[in-house]
């Protein structure tokens, strides 16, 4: 049953993506705004997650102030994390995405139009340039969503954080909201294709003001402790 649900979700995305693009691309070109395209993409992600048998519970979103841009930082254990976490954010967000994904037909073009930021982690200078583009996105009033481990954890435990996102936070002064996503490792761990049905929980922690931290490392440790606080003890 899980394999069938996963296949249905992927089949839906394969049909939905080009159909949505045929409507959203002209609209975005004409209006100069990617808001409608973003909303439709979020709706498609939610429906695909539902088809896969995944329910989403959200905790702590009331901690966030309206009309404030945030940098959201979340742990990362599964391919289903982005379509679960991004739709739970309060408003439109950009995301740091591996540069290889931007080569996918239609999807890559849509991500560029939606102000998503490609990142090349194998090239330090290119990665620094990506952080600069992320700062421009924040100045435009969008949120930024980042998985600071840089890749999925193979065993569900927190990996060391990359430094770039914390340079971004310290330089921009934008509040950081740590997020813990739970149960997605059990649904679809790294290396597995089939998504097991279940309920994922997205926990929003108290925003952290980088201006109140003496250093990048102090901010990094505060974010790590906050994310870890909702993880099972063996995965902190």
Image (spheres, rainbow, N blue to C red):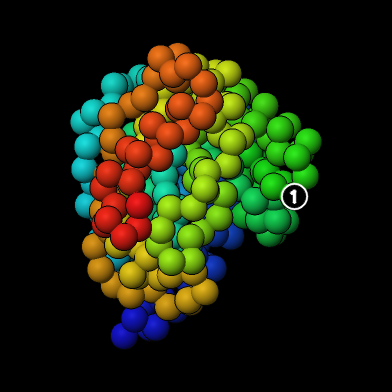
Q: Residue at x 48, y 76 (%)?
A: 192
Q: Residue at x 63, y 39 (%)?
A: 117
Task: Give the x, y percent position of residue 116.
Answer: 59, 40
Q: Is residue 143 visible?
A: no
The quarter of the image holding the N terminus is bottom left
Residue 149 higher or lower than 27, as above or below: below
Task: Give the x, y percent position of residue 159.
Answer: 49, 52
Per the image, label 1 sits on a secondary structure element best described as loop
Q: Residue at x 36, y 77 (%)?
A: 5
- Count of numbered circles on the image: 1
Task: Give the x, y percent position of residue 144.
Answer: 50, 33
Given residues 19 and 56, the one toward you in this image is 56
Q: Give the class, few, some or many, for how many residues have Cα within 10 Å of label 1's Cα (few <14, many ≥20).
A: few
Given residues 150 and 54, the one toward you in this image is 150
Q: Is residue 230 visible?
A: yes
The quadrant in which residue 139 appears is top right
Given residues 25 and 94, the one toward you in this image is 94
Residue 141 higher or lower than 42, as above or below: above
Q: Give the side of residue 200 with respect to residue 221, left or right.
A: left
Residue with the most extreme top position:
211
State the residue position of label 1. Answer: 122
Task: Give the x, y percent position of residue 224.
Answer: 40, 40
Q: Residue at x 29, y 38 (%)?
A: 204
């Amino acid at each position: 049953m899980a394999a069938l649900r996963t296949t249905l979700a992927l089949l839906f995305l394969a049909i939905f993506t080009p159909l949505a693009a045929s409507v959203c691309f002209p609209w975005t070109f004409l209006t100069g705004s990617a808001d409608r395209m973003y909303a439709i993409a979020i709706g498609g992600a939610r429906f695909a997650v539902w088809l896969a048998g995944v329910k989403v519970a959200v905790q702590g979103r009331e901690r966030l102030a309206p009309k404030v841009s945030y940098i959201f930082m979340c742990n990362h254990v599964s391919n289903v994390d982005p379509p679960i976490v991004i739709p739970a954010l309060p408003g439109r967000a950009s995301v740091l995405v591996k540069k290889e994904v931007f080569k996918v037909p239609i999807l890559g073009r849509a991500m560029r139009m939606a102000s998503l930021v490609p990142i090349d982690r194998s090239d330090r200078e290119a990665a620094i340039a990506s952080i600069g583009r992320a700062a421009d996105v924040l100045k435009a009033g969008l949120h930024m969503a980042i998985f600071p481990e840089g890749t999925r954890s193979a065993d569900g435990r927190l990996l060391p954080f990359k430094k770039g996102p914390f340079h971004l936070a310290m330089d921009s002064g934008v509040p950081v909201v740590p997020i813990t996503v739970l149960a997605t490792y059990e649904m679809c761990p790294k290396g597995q294709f089939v998504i097991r049905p279940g309920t994922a929980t997205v926990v929003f922690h108290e925003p952290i003001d980088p201006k109140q931290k003496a250093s990048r490392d102090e901010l990094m440790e505060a974010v790590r402790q906050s994310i870890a606080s909702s993880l099972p003890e063996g995965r902190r």
